[in-house]
Image (spheres, rainbow, N blue to C red):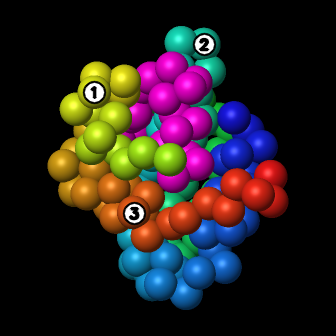
Amino acid sequence: MEQWIQYMIEQALTYEHIRKLLENKKWRICLSEKEKRWNLMFQHGNIRWIKDEGDHCDLLIEGTTSALLKLVRGEEMLQQLMKKREIQVKGSYRALLFFESFAWLFEVNTQQI
């Protein structure tokens, strides 16, 4: 999972249309499975993977590693995974819309990983 998150961050920042989406934004999006949590900070045109386990998340996305990988790899959209009840989401609706837009605009080239 860590490898995919790092790859997603590196690749996402190469796309100008995604950098524009990130301008003037500050969101902490947390991906969580039973025993692990990955915190992503989207802030001022940048994305960072934060290793601290702080409690605050603007959006918490919980699911199995398999479901989270589908999301991070771009294999399935957030709303599809929610409808199938493979992931649960808690947090602000605006953060949900932001992350859905980010995921929709971002396409992972799985051949390179």
Q: Amino acid at mark 2?
A: Glu
The image quadrant where one finds the N terminus is top right
The residue carrying mark 1 is 84
Label 1 environment density (alpha carbons within 10 Å; few <14, some 14–19, many ≥20): few
Q: Amino acid at mark 3?
A: Trp
Secondary structure beneath disc 1? loop
* Residue 50 found in image quarter: top right
Badge 3 or badge 1: first in the primary sequence: 1
Q: Amino acid at mark 1?
A: Lys
Mark nearer the viewer, 3 or 2: 3
* Residue 84 found in image quarter: top left
* Residue 10 found in image quarter: bottom right
Where does the image place residue 44, in percent across and percent down from the top left?
50, 75
Mark 3–mark 2 Cα distance, whole angstroms, equals: 27 Å
Could one spot residue 95 in this view of the protein?
Answer: no
Badge 2 or badge 1: first in the primary sequence: 2
The residue carrying mark 3 is 104
Magenta stretch holds residue 62 = yes
Where does the image place residue 107, in percent across and percent down from the top left?
55, 64
Mark 3–mark 1 Cα distance, whole angstroms, equals: 18 Å
Out of 101 and 60, give the one closest to the viewer. 101
- The residue located at (28%, 33%) in the rendering is 82
Which residue ends up furthest to the top in the rendered image? Answer: 34
- 10 relative position to 98: left or right: right
First to last magenta residue range: 56-74
- 73 relative position to 79: left or right: right
Q: Are marks 3 and 1 in contact (CB under 8 Å)?
A: no
The residue carrying mark 2 is 35
